[in-house]
């Protein structure tokens, strides 16, 4: 009888265990140094083949720019001014700005191949080491030392809805206002 009781008890303990699973879609997250960071607001926009992906929270913003994007392609950062990552942080009414460019920072943005993309969204990974922009104030660490470089690694953006900027036809002004975004079909 003890044997049956133990089996029933084990079965009940297994069935009463419940794992709560939360879904984080869309997502934009990375590790800043050793600190996990997740955007609370995300946006991806296509304008004449150029892709802009933004992840932000109340104080910080990461923006990834890709000129003439293609699924499945990796874009190197820090070698040109067309594929760029930027970071800004608002702290005590001061905005701190960091970026990659043709001569600063490094990293990559990699878009998943079309087979792994959900229609109407964009998914991929990134790594960005960005340097303080000329003229921008410099963040300081806990000891007061200047932070001249920010490093976002293990970055991922997952199923961020794509919208396409619609430029109105000058001959048909009812097509929309300049810069107005509409969802991509």
Image (cartoon, rainbow, N blue to C red):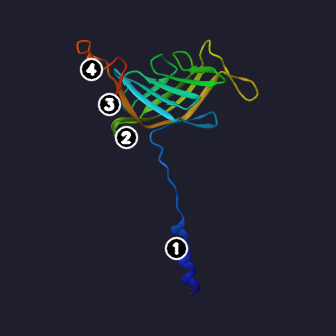
Q: Which residue appears at 44% of the width and 35% of the height? A: 124
Quadrant showing the C terminus: top left
The residue carrying pointer 3 sits among few (fewer than 14), some (14 to 19) or many (20 or more) residues within 10 Å by Cα, namely some
Estimate the spatial distance between the alpha carbons at disc 3 and disc 1, rounded to whole Å. Answer: 50 Å
Asked if the residue at tag 1 contacts the one at tag 4, i.e. Cβ–Cβ closer than 8 Å, the answer is no
Label 1: state its secondary structure.
helix
Query: Which residue is label 1 attached to?
Result: 11
Quadrant showing the N terminus: bottom right
Q: Earlier in the sequence, mark 2 or mark 4?
A: 2
Estimate the spatial distance between the alpha carbons at disc 4 and disc 3, rounded to whole Å. Answer: 15 Å
Which-is-in-front pick, marks 2 and 4? 4
Asked if the residue at tag 3 contacts the one at tag 2, i.e. Cβ–Cβ closer than 8 Å, the answer is no
Estimate the spatial distance between the alpha carbons at disc 4 and disc 1, rounded to whole Å. Answer: 63 Å
Seen from the viewer's position, the closer of residues 175 and 149 is 175
Query: Which residue is label 4 attached to?
Result: 175
Query: Which residue is label 3 attached to?
Result: 184
Label 4: state its secondary structure.
helix
Percent x, y for residue 46?
37, 25
Estimate the spatial distance between the alpha carbons at disc 2 and disc 4, rounded to whole Å. Answer: 33 Å
Considering every residue shown, the one lying at the far bottom of the view is: 1
Taking 91 as reference, is 11 left or right?
left
The residue carrying pointer 4 sits among few (fewer than 14), some (14 to 19) or many (20 or more) residues within 10 Å by Cα, namely few
Q: Earlier in the sequence, mark 3 or mark 1?
A: 1
Taking 134 as reference, is 156 left or right?
left
Q: Which residue appears at 63% of the width and 33% of the height? A: 33
Asked if the residue at tag 3 contacts the one at tag 4, i.e. Cβ–Cβ closer than 8 Å, the answer is no
Query: Which residue is label 2 attached to?
Result: 116
Q: Earlier in the sequence, mark 4 or mark 1?
A: 1
Q: Is residue 74 above or below residue 18?
A: above
Name the disc covering residue 78, or none.
none
Which-is-in-front pick, marks 2 and 3? 3
């Amino acid at each position: 009888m003890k044997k049956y009781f133990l089996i029933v008890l084990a079965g009940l303990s297994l069935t009463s265990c419940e794992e709560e699973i939360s879904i984080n879609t869309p997502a934009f997250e990375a590790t800043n140094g050793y600190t996990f960071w997740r955007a609370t607001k995300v946006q991806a926009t296509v304008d004449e083949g150029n892709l802009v992906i933004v992840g932000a929270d109340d104080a910080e913003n990461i923006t990834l720019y890709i000129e003439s994007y293609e699924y499945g392609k990796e874009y190197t950062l820090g070698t040109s001014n067309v594929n760029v990552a930027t970071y800004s942080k608002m702290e005590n009414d001061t905005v701190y700005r960091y970026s990659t460019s043709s001569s600063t920072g490094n990293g990559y943005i990699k878009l998943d191949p079309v087979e792994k993309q959900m229609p109407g969204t964009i998914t991929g990974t990134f790594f960005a080491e960005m340097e303080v922009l000329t003229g921008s104030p410099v963040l300081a660490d806990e000891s007061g030392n200047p932070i001249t470089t920010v490093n976002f690694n293990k970055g991922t953006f997952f199923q961020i809805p794509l919208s396409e900027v619609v430029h109105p036809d000058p001959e048909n002004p009812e097509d929309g206002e300049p810069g107005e975004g509409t969802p991509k079909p």
